[in-house]
Image (cartoon, rainbow, N blue to C red):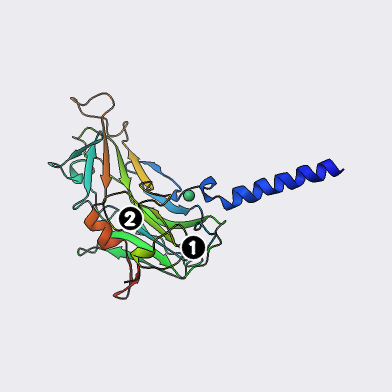
Amino acid sequence: MKQIKVAAQAALSIVALVGFSHHALAHTRLATPIVTEGVRVANDVVIGHGCGDGSYVIASSVVFPDGQDSTLKVNGAVVTDKVITDYVSNYGNLYQKVMDTGTFKQEDEKHDALSNTVGFYVKDGKVPAYYTVYLPFRASAHTFEPTSCTASVKVVIGIADICKATSVSGFSETTVNLWTPAVGSVFDGVGLHGYDSPATLTITRDLVNNPLPEGCSAEGDAVELIPSKAQMDRDMPIVVKGKQWWPKN
Ligand SMILES: [Cu+2]
């Protein structure tokens, strides 16, 4: 009997260890990270855990590449003489927040000067660190340019899960989880455990209805779209009624 008790205690302490190590938990990713072109998808940002000290997630900020000054990569190499619409003919304003104020009481989309949605934020929440949260949004159908060799497009997303609203200098494992591409913005999170580990949405070509044209390689081109430093610095902050709430100034 005594031996069983010891074993049970050991098991309990393993559970406790795992529980306190957020590295054992999932990073913030999309519920449906791979979709097919031409299909509109109800998707979610899935927040996997709170901050390093077990503190609550109180807000989250999401940025999609606007396709204006975003970095384009084709088969891993940066391309500067093309634009995203050479590959995805309808790129722009494809993402809409699905309203859901059950967990975070306040939310809004972020729009660029042309009213295109470039991201969204949620705030006024109090999510226990061990909870998983879904932030619903809709990704409209992406249409691949039929004359291009595009086989897939990976859209790189910038996300910040905020546990304490601080200034940039206050970013740490206990105040924010940054799931952003390292593009040199103040949201890179150098040294934090989500460094350069962004969530992505990959769209694959519908090879039945939109086969690769002649002259393409058998596997086609893998395209990647990454938000620019300028866009990250401009669009990651949470601004409510003209006033920046995060990061604090
Ligand atoms: Cu993590």
Q: Is 230 above or below relative to 242?
A: above
On residue 57, the disc is: 1
| Residue that carries the numbered disc 2 in the rendered image | 95
Question: Going 19% across and 53% down the picture, which residue do you hit?
Answer: 68
Dividing the picture into quadrants, the one containing residue 77 is: top left
Looking at the image, which is closer to me, 58 or 86? 58
Q: Are marks 1 and 2 in contact (CB under 8 Å)?
A: no
Labels 1 and 2: the sequence-earlier one: 1
Looking at the image, which is closer to me, 183 or 105? 183
Question: Going 77% across and 42% down the picture, which residue do you hit?
Answer: 7
Q: Check the image and name the residue furthest to the left.
A: 81
Pair 1/2: label in front: 1
Local packing at callout 1 (Cα closer than 10 Å; few below 14, some 14-19, many 20+) is: many
Q: Is 119 above or below relative to 196?
A: below
Dividing the picture into quadrants, the one containing residue 136 is: bottom left
Local packing at callout 2 (Cα closer than 10 Å; few below 14, some 14-19, many 20+) is: many
Question: Going 79% across and 44% down the picture, which residue do you hit?
Answer: 6
- Give the position of the C terminus as an image quadrant: bottom left
Q: Position of residue 41 (x, y in %)?
A: 39, 49
Amino acid beneath label 1: Val
Q: Position of residue 12 (x, y in %)?
A: 70, 48
Q: In this view of the protein, can residue 24 be seen by the observer? A: yes
User: Is label 2 in a helix, a strand or a loop?
Assistant: strand
Q: Is 237 above or below relative to 225?
A: below
- Give the position of the N terminus as an image quadrant: top right
Q: Position of residue 50 (x, y in %)?
A: 51, 58
Amino acid beneath label 2: Tyr
> Is 207 left or right of 102, judged from the image as shown?
left
Marks 1 and 2, how far apart at CA: 23 Å
